[in-house]
Every structure is written in C-alpha cells, then in structure tokens.
Amino acid sequence: MDVVDIKAFVPSKDYEISKAFYSEIGFESEFVSEDLTLFQNGDCLFFLQRFFNEDLANNFMLQVCVSDIDTAYSLCSQSKHKTKITPVQSESWGKVFYLWGPVGELLHITELGG
C-alpha cells in the first residue's frame, strides 16, 4: 500500500457552530455536501461531518502543527466557539497549547523544535 494522503472526519453536534469555530481558527471551508465540509489550511485538510457521537467527540484528538505558536495562540484565544484553551507550554520537543472545540474535540496546537 502506497498511502498518499489521510484526512480525519471530525464530528460535530451543531454543524454550523463547528463550521464557524474552524473558520475562526484559520481554516478555509469548501462545501462538499449538506453533511460534509472540507476544511483547509495550506496543504492540511480534514472533513467536518454532520455526525455526533458523544464518546467519539470526547475522545477525538488532532495534532495541529504550526510554524508560530504565539500567532496561533492569539488567533485561537479569540475564538467565540472554543470550549477551553490552555496557556502555551514548553516541552522538550517544542511548544504546545490545548484547544477544545465545540463538541469537546481536543486540538494539540504544536510548534515542533527546541
């Protein structure tokens, strides 16, 4: 098998609120169907689906690697639809903050490097 791409399917409880959240934090949306929206930032893409399962949503995580953690934090802090955000933390492998979306999905916003 020669894998050339992988896209996650992110759950949503209120589809419009989740679409607004991902737009607020810098992703551009593209209509796919009434139940599916493609979000993109640079070469990175994922699908937002009109589907909700509480267990899935509460355990769903994405690592989002960024080139500038401070710019990302500033943008994400302003989101009206986030449910929680932590301060930026320094780790041995780089910097990270944690951002929870509208259904409890957890985004690890990460700047890799020392």
Image (cartoon, rainbow, N blue to C red):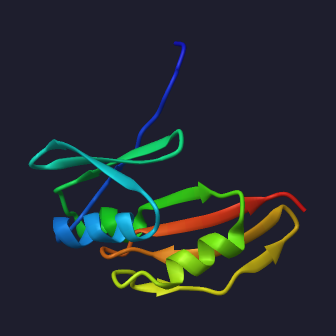
Q: Image quadrant for the C terminus?
A: bottom right
| Total marks in image | 0
Snapshot quadrant of residue 19: bottom left
Kindly identify the residue that appears in the image at 82 percent across and 71 percent down.
Answer: 91
Decide which of 111, 74 is in the foreground and name it. 74
83 lies left or right of 75: left
- On the image, the x and y values in percent for residue 67 come to 71, 57
Kindly identify the residue that appears in the image at 70 percent across and 81 percent down.
Answer: 88
52 lies left or right of 83: left
Residue farthest along the left direction in this orientation: 34
Kindly identify the residue that appears in the image at 58 percent across and 76 percent down.
Answer: 98
- On the image, the x and y values in percent for residue 84 come to 46, 86
- On the image, the x and y values in percent for residue 71 come to 65, 72
**Above-or-below relation of 58 to 48:** below
Kindly identify the residue that appears in the image at 19 percent across and 47 percent down.
Answer: 36
**Above-or-below relation of 75 to 33:** below
- On the image, the x and y values in percent for residue 53 come to 22, 64
